[in-house]
Image (spheres, helix red, strand yellow):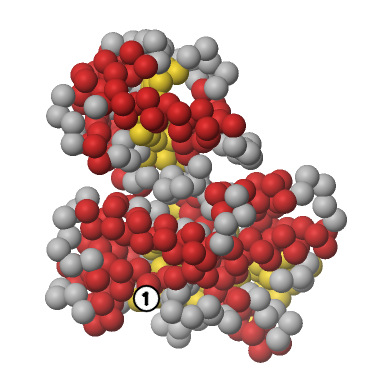
Amino acid sequence: MIKDIIILQKRELEKKLKELYVPREAEIKEIQSDLIKVIIGPRRAGKSLFSMHSLSRQPNFGYVNFDDEKLIDVTDYNEIICAVDDVYNKPKYLLLDEIQNLAKWELFVNRLQRQGYKLIITGSNSRLLSSELATHLTGRYSSVLLFTFSPKEFLKFNRQKATEVENKAHLNSYLELGGYPEPLVKKLNYKEYLSTLLDSIIYKDIVKRFKIRSAQGVEDLASYLVSNVAKDYSYNTLMQVTKCKSVHTVEKYLGYLEESFVLFRLNRFSFKLKVQVKSPKKIYCFDNGFISAKAFKISSDIGRIYENTVAIKLKKLELERKISIFYWKNQQQQEVDFVIKKDTRIQQLIQVCFRITDPVVKRREVRALLLASKELKCGNLLVITTDCEEEIEEEWFGIKRTIKFIPLWKWLLK
């Protein structure tokens, strides 16, 4: 039976390698080395296809997809490897897809490496990004983050060479549709595809995996938060909305959604860790497409879509451990959308403002930046807007700073 599954998966592999493929910005370095290559990112972001094409230049590789209930119930993993060796004629390279579904996967992977296999493993769980990965894999490893299409990849698919007007039009589509590759490449209905995908993530990656008795609480929580991106929240409010019995349950469900690359949280910046932990957090979605597909109603507040788009790009940098990101708010409720911290230094303060041509809005955003600049001792101030591009000096109550304004589409493509 296991051999039959591997044969069917081989046919699936051969079919996928013939499909249209958009080369990704990410790269697997030293593919021929003994390092275990770990490809991490959201479900359906293209990790499998990326890995297959990365290995396609090698003379022979085997493929096992553990997103299959028949395989994850197997107790003797030797049977899987025997079947792979038979079907693929003892391959030197192995691609193990969605490895997190396999019980004690780390022991299995370590053993295969000791036996001389060159491994690429993929996973749709952000816990594989944490320091615990080092404790799981006794051998050396390298990790690659692969998310849904970036704006550059989205534009690359739509048109190799485009005018500025065309680029803006494509990026407006990106803001609404998000970057999931499959509906773009296969011209599927985005809303139906992403609605079904989010349901699948909730039920397969969360409810089934963590043995949650009632799925409604997780589903209600996801729908509510996706409808309220770029807003702060309290656990008590979420408990009432989802009818969960305790704050602890809400926090646990939110953690599962974060691990599955659906949502992520942003801490309020404070020099005191205790204040950071206790302060309300802001919520964002890993892909704008989920907002269009699953929000209670498609929001007319394009400003929050702008902010979520910026948050996604910054979050990727944070997951790559290049920066840390926060938001800032003072007691007067003046707010700066993003505080960028690198090492121990505040590197940049960013406001995202769709309606910057409104004098009242502009004054509010600029004043918050100036106050945060003084408190956090940071002079690198940026406002991401629709079309405004300039550099001006602003002053308020003796705080004088130079502020840069840049259109969102230009910032995304930098």
Name the residue at 60% across, 67% down.
Answer: 176
Q: Give the left or right position of residue 253, taking residue 91 as reference.
A: left
> Percent from the top left, x then y, of residue 46?
51, 42
> Percent from the top left, x then y, of residue 109?
28, 24
Farthest residue, direction bottom:
360
Name the residue at 24% across, 71% down.
Answer: 217
For disc 1, the marked residue is 224
| On-image quarter of the N terminus | top left
Name the residue at 14% across, 63% down.
Answer: 213
Q: How many marks?
A: 1
Q: Give the left or right position of residue 307, taking residue 221 as reference.
A: right
Does the rendering let one see residue 135?
no
Q: Within the image, what quadrant is residue 18 found in?
A: top right
Three-letter amino acid code at the position of disc 1: Tyr
Q: Give the left or right position of residue 384, taking residue 341 as reference.
A: right
Q: Within the image, what quadrant is residue 67 found in?
A: top left
> Percent from the top left, x then y, of residue 320?
47, 43
Q: Secondary structure at mark 1?
A: helix
- In the image shown, does 316 or 287 lie closer to the viewer? 287
Does the rendering let one see residue 361?
yes
Characterize the local packing of mark 1: few (<14), some (14-19) or many (20 or more) Cα atoms within 10 angstroms. some
Query: Relative to 166, does residue 30 appear above or below in the rendering?
Result: above
Name the residue at 62% across, 48% down.
Answer: 185
Farthest residue, direction right:
163
> Percent from the top left, x then y, of residue 103?
19, 36
